[in-house]
Amino acid sequence: MPQATLCHAIATQNIVRIYYTGDEAIGFRTVEPHMVAYNEAGNLSLSAWCLGGASETPETQGWREYLLSEISNVTVLQHRFFGPRAGYQRDGGKKYHNVQCAV
């Protein structure tokens, strides 16, 4: 499970590249990881700002949720992001609980 790698990238605010198989747009995504927490369905998830890559939506950038069970090939990139994106809730808001790590 990529949780430790993602939490390290969150702590250092490094952009990551992941391979995601959890939707119809299977493939690589480049994201700013913001939080690993449990979603409303009780699944461990990554909340991240998607910068680009495979996507089910025409908008490549924006907030996305990725199930950790569907993430592989996590690569921590040298590029960093600086602080949370607009709309970020460090406590998980209504969508996430039992936060494992967060920006």
Image (cartoon, grey):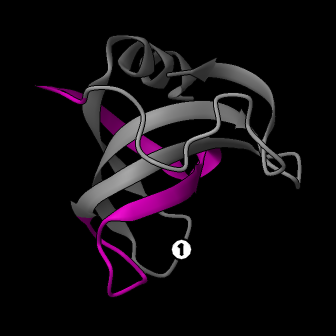
Q: Residue at x 42, y 34 (%)?
A: 84
Q: Position of residue 22 (x, y in %)?
A: 56, 65
User: In which quadrant is the N terminus drawn?
Assistant: top right
Relative height, residue 32 to residue 103 (above, below)? below
The 10 Å Cα crowd at callout 1, few under 14, some 14 to 19, many 20 or more, is few
The residue at the far front in this view is 86
Which of the two residues, 102 or 26, is positioned nearer the viewer here? Answer: 102
Write down the quadrant of residue 78 in the picture: top left
State which region is magenta.
53-81
Write down the quadrant of residue 13 in the picture: top left
Write down the quadrant of residue 97 in the picture: top right
Q: Position of residue 37 (x, y in %)?
A: 71, 33
The residue at the far right in this view is 41
SS for callout 1: loop
Which of the two residues, 81 or 28, is positioned nearer the viewer here? Answer: 81
- Asked whether 67 falls inside the magenta stretch, the response is yes
Q: Residue at x 29, y 72 (%)?
A: 60
Relative height, residue 69 to residue 28 (above, below)? above
- Asked whether 27 falls inside the magenta stretch, the response is no
Q: Residue at x 51, y 59 (%)?
A: 64
Label 1 amino acid? Answer: Asp
Q: Position of residue 77 (x, y in %)?
A: 16, 28
Q: Which residue is mark 1?
A: 23
Q: Position of residue 86 (x, y in %)?
A: 45, 48
Relative height, residue 96 to residue 6 (above, below)? below
Q: Residue at x 34, y 35 (%)?
A: 74
The residue at the far bottom in this view is 58
